Amino acid sequence: MNKTYTFIIGSGFSAPIGLPVGKKLNDMMLEAENLPIGFSTSGDLIVSKDGTRPDIGFTTSYDNTFSFGVKLMKYYYKKFDAFDYEDFYDYINQIHDRAIKKKQDVDLQELYELLPTNYYIQSEDEDKRGLQLYHQTYQLNHIYQELVNYLLTLPDKIDVSLYKKFIVYLIKLVNEGNVVNVYSLNHDVLIERLIYSYRQDNLFCDGFTDVNTPYYGLINGEYSQLEYFANQYDKPIRLHKLHGSTSYYAFYKEVETASFDASNMIKRPYGLNDFDLYYKDGNDTILGRKVRGMLSMGADFLTGTTAKIRRYESPIYYKPQFEKFEKDLTVTNSL
């Protein structure tokens, strides 16, 4: 009788190839000002090739926000004598909510001193300074995710042999006619990299597909089909990333109100510009009527010990994942 095997993996799975976990990741966040990174005018993270901070000729508003974020992380560490990158993400959101209320608050008074003076006009007016702090934490919410993404990016070269026994074991289970569910709490793309390195993609699925996709991107002058989350698991090795991924982006399609509605989660291929996204309605050909789309500002993965819980009910990706997780746990033969 065929069986179902379920694996749950966490950050320790990625440690052998050098990705930071636990204290190392927290320490790297606190020393972020020494990283060879900067930010474009649209908030995209830029990495220099010579190990120094990128210089595009001027300082962007996101560069200023990054400097504010570095100060805020050090302030947080000094205040609480500890730093955890997920707890700090919740802290950013708490400050953001408090700042817009513009109430007299001792903590906020201290935080005003961290605001970038070369970009924002310092003011004794409580409302104006509250708005400045509100805006800074709004931008920081995005680039903080970009920073975590950068630190969790796989090296160009990894020793896949470190995971050979694991992959061989998965293949053995599949060859015996079993189904293997891998539930990952990690944001990195190590599992996918390993599967492709061992040429087992014919046995592997992650719920995404480009079959009958309505999502397109204009890359190098040609329309390319984009993989989207269809909640489709039709192969024996099934990957579920409960907290999202550095390769997943929320896709928003333009609606009649001239705003954008969240549509689905897609995988963003290298070279895809935010301005070259399209959504195809019905039977319209891609060269006919195209509906403009846009991506979330950064990769879509869950951060924050409490902020992530609020997104478990998101219908675009996370709710179906957790529903499948609960169902699979009730039928698995081995965990």
Image: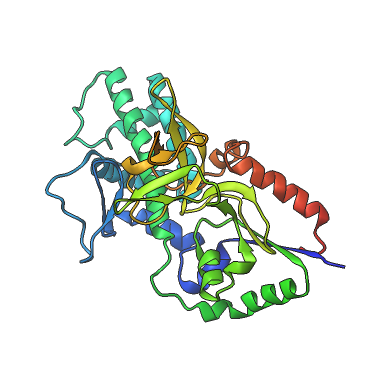
Residue sitting at x 33%, y 33%: 110
Q: Which residue lies furthest to the left in this view?
A: 57
Q: Is residue 222 left or right of residue 181?
A: left
Tell me if residue 197 comes above or below residue 265 in the rendering: below
Q: In this view, does 238 lie to the left or right of 35?
A: right
Residue sitting at x 23%, y 41%: 41
Of 94 and 210, nearer the camera is 210
- Relative image position of residue 232 (x, y in whole percent): 64, 51
Tell me if residue 146 comes above or below residue 97 in the rendering: below
Q: Say which quarter of the image contains residue 314.
A: top right
- Relative image position of residue 255 (x, y in whole percent): 44, 26
Q: In this view, does 48 lie to the left or right of 315?
A: left
Look at the image and tell me in which quarter the C terminus lies. bottom right
Tell me if residue 237 comes above or below residue 274 in the rendering: below
Of 80 and 269, nearer the camera is 269
Residue sitting at x 40%, y 25%: 259
Tell me if I can see residue 295 in this picture. Answer: no
Q: Say which quarter of the image contains residue 306.
A: top right
- Relative image position of residue 214 (x, y in whole percent): 50, 42
Q: In this view, does 156 lie to the left or right of 312?
A: left
Q: Say which quarter of the image contains residue 1.
A: bottom right
Residue sitting at x 82%, y 55%: 331
- Relative image position of residue 165 (x, y in whole percent): 63, 80
